Amino acid sequence: MKKSIYISGISCILLMMFGCMFKVMHWPGASVMIIVSVALFCTLFLPAALMQSNNEQKEKNRSTLHIVSYIVFVACMITVLFKVMHWPGAGALLFIGVLFPFLVFLPVYLYNTREESKINNKNFLGVMFGLIFLAVFGALLSMTVSKQILGK
């Protein structure tokens, strides 16, 4: 199971990287690669990885955390997909995608890990770093620079 999770994760990442490279270079097939990689990531890799993580947990009461993690990841991936593909509604989704992890995931994470004390500090710092990175990345995606500014 772990081997298939690693293979699907690496293949999704590679497909996404090649799709982004093709998109930057304006080569044909970029859109298909990006859409397929996000679809495979959200339907194949992410559920399998979260189920494996849930099965390896000592406490089995963390299924809510894994479900919320899946929903937040999918919302963020769809937000990035809309922004990269320049589809309508990307701005509204970006606003939701930046706030969603803080308003939904963080309270559930803090509630589920409230009993852990020393181990939780490293995990909490990692989660906060990830959420801050997500917020900064979303803010950078939302900024649009006009051609007039770049031309001067």
Image: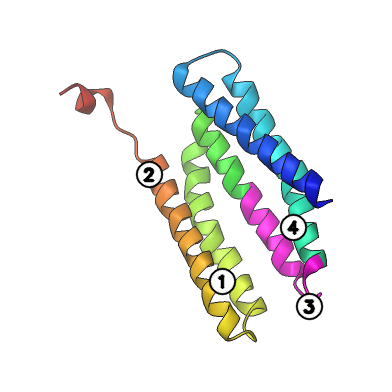
- The residues tagged by marks 3 and 1 sit, at their Cα atoms, a distance apart of 16 Å
Residue 33's image quarter?
top right
Mark 3 or mark 1, earlier in chain: 3
Q: Which residue occupies 66% across, 33% down? A: 37
What is the x, y in percent for residue 55? 82, 65
**Disc on the earlier residue, 2 or 4:** 4
Residue 35 lies within the magenta run:
no
Q: Which residues are magenta?
A: 56-74
The residue beneath circle 2 is 140
Of the numbered discs in the image, which one, if any, rests on residue 123? 1
Left or right side of 38 for 92: left
In 3D space, how far apart are the residues under numbered discs 1 and 2 (Cα atoms)? Answer: 26 Å
Q: Who comes first in sequence, dot 3 or dot 2?
A: 3
Q: Earlier in the sequence, mark 1 or mark 2?
A: 1
Q: Which residue is mark 4?
A: 50
Q: CA distance from mark 3 to mark 4?
A: 14 Å
The nearer-to-camera label among 1 and 2 is 1
Q: Which quadrant of the rendered structure holds the C terminus?
A: top left
**Is residue 140 shown left or right of residue 62?**
left
